[in-house]
Image (spheres, rainbow, N blue to C red):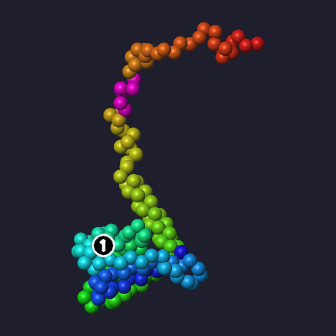
């Protein structure tokens, strides 16, 4: 699904409007959600960092994926700079998000495999005599075991009596 986020800075109202659109029909964008934020709130969140800004713009109605949220936060920061534009439009395609996710997952798996190969030396694992714990060889545990289950003398599962 293709998505579009329109961000509009309204200096007269001291607000920031974020509109989320989605392509529900071929090449036709439909408005899904519109959120209005005070510029004071957004500027305060921006001072605390990009993650705080993302937390400030996410609501129950509009919760963009993290990749989209970072791009939206960058656009908002650009709009709130002095001399910044009044509006910005961001276009996203979910297909690109999934393809990027697969590439990142493959790269991370390869890096983890390389790190695991470098960190572990098989000879060190095999030569470690202290690794075996002798506590499991205590026979007294089995001889002192008390149970309420008794085996019947004439067990029907006994195959010697069967004809």
* Picture residue at 56% right of the left edge, 77% below the top: 24
* Picture residue at 35% right of the left edge, 52% below the top: 119
Q: Is residue 109 left or right of residue 10?
A: right
Magenta residues, start to end: 132-137
Residue closest to the far front = 13
67 magenta-colored: no
Decide if residue 78 is in sight here: no
Nearer-the-camera pick, 133 or 37: 37
Secondary structure type for disc 1: helix
Residue closest to the far right = 163
* Picture residue at 48% right of the left edge, 76% below the top: 32
Nearer-the-camera pick, 113 or 25: 25
Q: Is residue 90 left or right of residue 45?
A: right
* Picture residue at 60% right of the left edge, 8% below the top: 153
Image spot of residue 21 (x, y percent): 48, 79
What secondary structure predominates along the stretch shown in magenta?
helix
Q: Is residue 95 above or below residue 90?
A: above
Residue at the disc numbered 1: 53
Image spot of residue 88 (x, y percent): 38, 86
Nearer-the-camera pick, 63 or 95: 63
- State which quarter of the image contains the C terminus: top right
């Amino acid at each position: 699904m293709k998505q579009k986020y329109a961000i509009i800075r309204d200096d007269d109202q001291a607000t920031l409007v974020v509109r989320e659109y989605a392509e529900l029909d071929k090449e036709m964008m439909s408005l899904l959600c519109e959120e209005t934020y005070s510029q004071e709130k957004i500027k305060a969140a921006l001072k605390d960092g990009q993650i705080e800004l993302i937390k400030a713009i996410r609501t129950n109605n509009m919760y963009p994926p993290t990749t989209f949220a970072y791009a939206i936060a960058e656009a908002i920061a650009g709009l709130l700079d002095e001399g910044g534009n009044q509006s910005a439009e961001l276009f996203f395609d979910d297909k690109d998000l999934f393809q990027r996710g697969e590439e990142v997952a493959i790269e991370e798996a390869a890096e983890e495999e390389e790190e695991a190969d470098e960190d572990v030396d098989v000879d060190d694992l095999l030569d470690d005599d202290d690794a075996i714990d002798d506590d499991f060889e205590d026979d007294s545990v089995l001889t002192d075991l008390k149970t309420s289950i008794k085996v019947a003398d004439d067990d029907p599962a006994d195959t010697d009596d069967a004809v």
